[in-house]
């Protein structure tokens, strides 16, 4: 049984270790890609001032490896190729990077990726 552990922002070091320990190697790499993209994208859009950066949690970037490529999406739908270039490069260890925009701004990045996978026939559309 997994127990939930309360973690607040003052416990960042503990949180990151706990979070990364729960991920497989591939998931950890996807997480690192998403974090780098979020940092570059959010700073480009909102600036790098302390007050602007304090709201970075208001956006999200998700990434997943798909058939030799990396698909990325953001809640704000404002992810641009220049963010990819700055954060990880357009070809990340031989994987092309694709920006997915599936839905309206505000739709969770993870859901955009899942919907794109479903619509591409790569994920079964099973009823809950």
Image (spheres, rainbow, N blue to C red):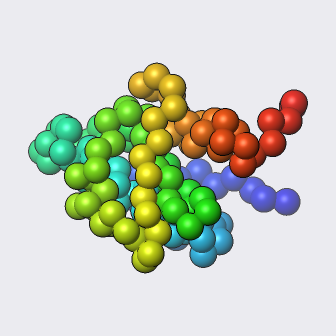
Residue at the image position 31 percent from the left and 56 percent from the top: 84
For this orientation, the residue located farthest to the front is 120
Looking at this view, is 3 or 79 the one in front?
79
In the depicted structure, whether residue 106 falls above or below residue 59: above
In the depicted structure, whether residue 25 falls above or below residue 13: below
Image quadrant occupied by the C terminus: top right
For this orientation, the residue located farthest to the top is 104
Image quadrant occupied by the N terminus: bottom right
Q: Taking 85 as reference, is 119 left or right?
A: right
Residue at the image position 81 percent from the left and 42 percent from the top: 124
Looking at this view, is 73 or 68 the one in front?
68
Residue at the image position 69 percent from the left and 52 percent from the top: 4
Q: Taking 29 as reference, is 59 left or right?
A: left
Asked if one can make out residue 11 in the rendered structure from this viewpoint, the answer is: no
Q: Position of residue 45 (x, y in %)?
A: 20, 38
In the depicted structure, whether residue 89 falls above or below residue 64: below
Q: Position of residue 62 (x, y in %)?
A: 49, 49
């Amino acid at each position: 049984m997994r127990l939930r552990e309360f973690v607040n922002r003052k416990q960042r070091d503990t949180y990151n270790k706990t979070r990364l320990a729960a991920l497989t190697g591939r998931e950890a790499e996807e997480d690192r890609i998403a974090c780098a993209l979020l940092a570059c994208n959010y700073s480009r859009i909102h600036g790098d001032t302390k007050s602007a950066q304090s709201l970075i949690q208001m956006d999200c970037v998700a990434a997943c490896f798909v058939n030799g490529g990396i698909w990325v999406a953001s809640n704000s739908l404002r992810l641009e190729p220049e963010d990819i270039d700055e954060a990880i490069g357009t070809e990340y260890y031989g994987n092309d990077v694709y920006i997915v925009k599936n839905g309206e701004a505000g739709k969770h990045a993870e859901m955009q990726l899942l919907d794109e996978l479903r619509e591409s026939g790569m994920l079964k559309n099973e009823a809950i």
